[in-house]
Image (cartoon, helix red, strand yellow):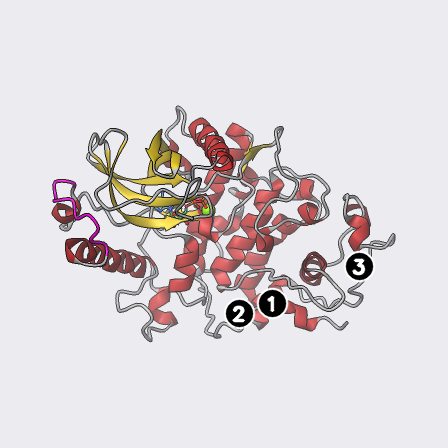
Amino acid sequence: SYRKGGYHAVRIGDQFAGGRYIAQRKLGWGQFSTVWLAYDTSTSAYVALKIQKSAAQFVQAALHEIDVLASISDGVDVNSKCVVQLIDHFKHAGPNGQHLCMVIEFLGDSLLRLIKYNRYKGLPLNKVREICHCILIGLDYLHREHGIIHTDLKPENVLLISTIDPAKDPVKSEVSPILERPEGSINGGVTSLIEKKLKRRARRAVAKISGRTASIGGTEDQKSVRNLDGIDVRCKVVDFGNACWADKQFAEEIQTRQYRAPEVILQAGYSFSVDMWSFACIAFELATGDMLFTPKVGQGFSEDEDHLALMMELLGKMPRKVATAGAKSKDFFDRHGDLKRIRRLKFWPLSKLLVDRYKFSQSDAHEFSEFLLPLLDFVPEKRPTAQQCLQHPWLRGTESNEKNESSVENVGVGMSNLKIK
Ligand code: ADP
Ligand code: MG
């Protein structure tokens, strides 16, 4: 991908925007871009520098993302809004072409990493509450103040607010741009030392968040994982590459598979409520460590069809009106609103699943289901808005303070195997 139209190759110490930003280390990459930790010499702060591939369609996509980011970063104190902030953008000419670059605030690990670090066991419910609260603030801001639908909400796209502050950190002198440019020394010398230190720090930061101060991947039990009180978990919604305005939509097929709402599968049109569906999927995943729906292609049925079947096994039968309302409804449902190719479904309601499989207490399971189920309504208009959801008693944690006592190992949801076909 490092060719004409592709990624821009960056070396540590490379300068951007006339020397204002200096590349420090790679933070991550996506299909369209690489993302770098950079030092902003004009504000003496660390930022994330997203460098887009240079081919026309990537430039187009970046312009769109900048458009969305600029509109949500405008005016208000975005910091309190739980969405990532755009600081600057510019073009950078390299051997592979002209790359659009976005300068965004530097954030920490994604929720996916947090779930992984917790060895897919699920976070304590009070932490789930805090994270849900943040995501909802972000969604409410996007939906109500900007008319924007994110359309790709998933754990990778929610980043923790970084607890690493390289600027205030003892390793500062090592990563500061004053340092000799350690060009080409990614695999050795000073750079790798800095990288190792930053990595270790990042690991420790996550360990702190997930309540473990001992080594990651060790044998700490749930007890230590549960002991997270006093750590304020905050996060922000990122990746607006696919976001759209409710009245200006671009794609019919949106969302990452597991977080996709039923109306999207059926192509029955969509609105803000698709983000609420994905939000519920994320909340479940945070609390249990497992994805809520993991559809698979099977003999004689498609992934879409399996997905719809899984939804109905958990949530009950889809109202006929909804099932038959989409452009693709006829591919899956007969005129009675029954799936054509997956006939017998085994109903396993959410609260029972939480108790049976995840060993929630009855009251935790009941309260958590009361929070999630309205968000998973098959009728999109009936799902609560982010604003309404923020009022839900579950978020206030006024219920019993019993924690998720789950100690079962991850066995994978795989609800498909309950289907009698
Ligand atoms: P793409 O649109 O190409 O998928 P993303 O915006 O998803 O790019 O970013 C790719 C990766 O870079 C993310 O998964 C994350 O690991 C990292 N990243 C993105 N933005 C930031 C940020 N603000 N701070 C820290 N890391 C980030
Ligand atoms: Mg991405």
Instruction: Say what amino acid the circle numbered 2 marks.
Output: Tyr
Q: Horizontal placement of 91 versus 306: left or right?
A: left
Please check the rendered image and state whether residue 166 is part of the magenta-colored stretch, yes or no. Answer: no
The residue positioned farthest toward the top in the image shown = 75
- Mark 2 near mark 3, Cβ–Cβ under 8 Å? no
Residue identified by numbered label 3? 339
Q: Are marks 1 and 2 in contact (CB under 8 Å)?
A: yes
Figure quadrant of residue 83: top left
Residue neighbourhood size for the residue with mark 1, other residues' Cα within 10 Å, grouped as few (<14), some (14–19), many (≥20): some
What x and y, as percent, mark residue 275? 57, 43
Q: Please tell me which residue is depicted at 69% across the width and 72% down the height of the picture.
A: 418
Which label belongs to residue 171?
none
Q: Quadrant of the C terminus?
A: bottom right
What's the distance in space between the residues labelled 3 and 1, CA to CA?
23 Å
Indicate the position of residue 254 as horizontal and vertical percent values.
61, 44
> For the residue labelled by badge 2, is the local secondary structure a helix, a strand or a loop?
loop
Q: CA distance from mark 2 to mark 3?
A: 29 Å
Q: Which residues are magenta?
A: 177-186
Q: Earlier in the sequence, mark 1 or mark 2?
A: 1
Residue placed most toward the observer, 391 or 13: 13
* Residue of label 2: 358
Q: Position of residue 416 (x, y in %)?
A: 67, 68
Classify 10 Å Cα crowding around label 3: few (below 14), some (14-19), many (20 and above).
many
Q: State yes or no: Cβ of the residue under disc 3 lies below 8 Å from any atom of ligand 2.
A: no
At label 3, which amino acid type do we have?
Leu
Q: Which residue is mark 1?
A: 353
